[in-house]
Image (cartoon, rainbow, N blue to C red):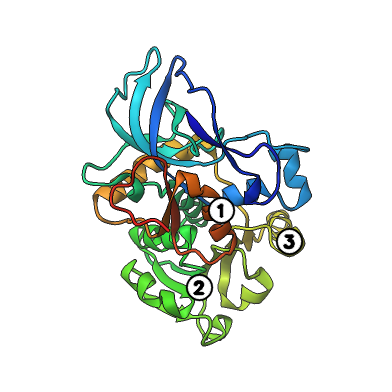
Amino acid sequence: MKAVISARYGSPDVLEIRQVPKPEPRAGEVLVRVHATTVSRTDCGMLRPHPFFVRFVAGLLRPRRTILGMDFAGVVEAVGAGVASFKPGDRVFGLSPDEYGAHAEYLCVPETGAIATMPAAAGFGEVVVCEGAWYADTYLQAFRVGSGHSLLVYGASGAIGTAAVQLAKSYGARVTAVVATRHLDLVRTLGADRAVDYTAQDFTQMGETFDFVFDAVGKTSFFRCRRLLKPGGVFAATDLGPWCQNPLLAIGSSIRGSHRVMFPLPQSSKARAFVDLLKTRLEAGEFRGVIDRAYRLEAIADAYRYVETGQKTGIVVVNVRPADGTTHA
């Protein structure tokens, strides 16, 4: 099978498309013929681990995972012994949060892992939305967002931000989305109650306070946003922040008992339940993927280069097999 190999750290130039052995499903595993995947900030971070201590997880001298890609959508090719929930021919989607491996023509995932059958009318490129949504929901669950709460999402146009707006609305929150001018209409169509253009005004001076402030792109800070918080309000960000301040502030906040800053980490054990939830939201029309652009597998290095610009809207799809109507970049 063809797979995108990152045998060493570096720029997207180190990526190579190679022929590698097709995996065989073991007992309890499902072999998926991948039709679509994504390139995400996570993939780019695994290709160029920063700060350096990330390499203690990713691999000190060279990558432990040579095939990246967490999101997948495709067709079940075969199943291992004992698998009862899926059969060959099923259209499936989900996440591979522990092993990655979706940047390839085939991927094995556990039957009990983060995999579900696709909504009947959906295309493969429309459902590779799990990773960003999973991260977003991890934060919303940590906040315990619910009816009557107010939430500000900074960077609401990315994969995590667009998901956070939609999921928070489904939980009953009132959402303010902070984006650039060109994304104002987008976030309104996703359900945001208020859209704020950060290029036209300092969003921290809007004169309103919130139960939760969520930095979905890691480009602001608690110190800049704390005036936006109600008494007892909580700030969280998806990135480490300058000098790794966000996890350190979260630890200090927890020790003091204020819980003013959070830095929750997604748990693989909860990924299956989330994929099932997302399927329900997709079928109900309460969630949709926002696709910026799509690439062929052979052009995946260009997809990485684009994601690295930090300017993508929603998700960047990679069509491993012929696309179902998605226009390629």
Question: 328 or 260, which lies in front?
Answer: 328
Q: CA distance from mark 2 to mark 3?
A: 22 Å
Question: 261 or 56, which lies in front?
Answer: 56
Residue 7 in the image: state x and y as whole percent.
Answer: 67, 36
- What is the total number of numbered labels drawn onto the structure image? 3
Image mark for residue 258: none
* Residue receiving disc 2: 210
Counting other residues with Cα less than 10 Å from the Cα at mark 3, is it few (<14), some (14-19), or many (20 or more)?
some
Residue 76 in the image: state x and y as whole percent.
Answer: 34, 27
Residue kind at label 3, given as amino acid type: Gln
Q: CA distance from mark 3 to mark 1?
A: 27 Å
* Residue receiving disc 3: 245
State which quadrant residue 90 falls in. Answer: top left
Nearest-to-viewer mark from 2 and 3 = 3
Q: Residue at x 63, y 70 (%)?
A: 220
* Residue receiving disc 1: 304
| Nearest to N terminus: mark 2 or mark 1 | 2
Position of 154 with respect to 256 (left or right) is: left
Nearest-to-viewer mark from 2 and 1 = 1
Position of 60 with respect to 81 (left or right) is: right
Q: Residue at x 52, y 80 (%)?
A: 198
Q: CA distance from mark 2 to mark 1?
A: 35 Å
Q: Residue at x 48, y 74 (%)?
A: 179
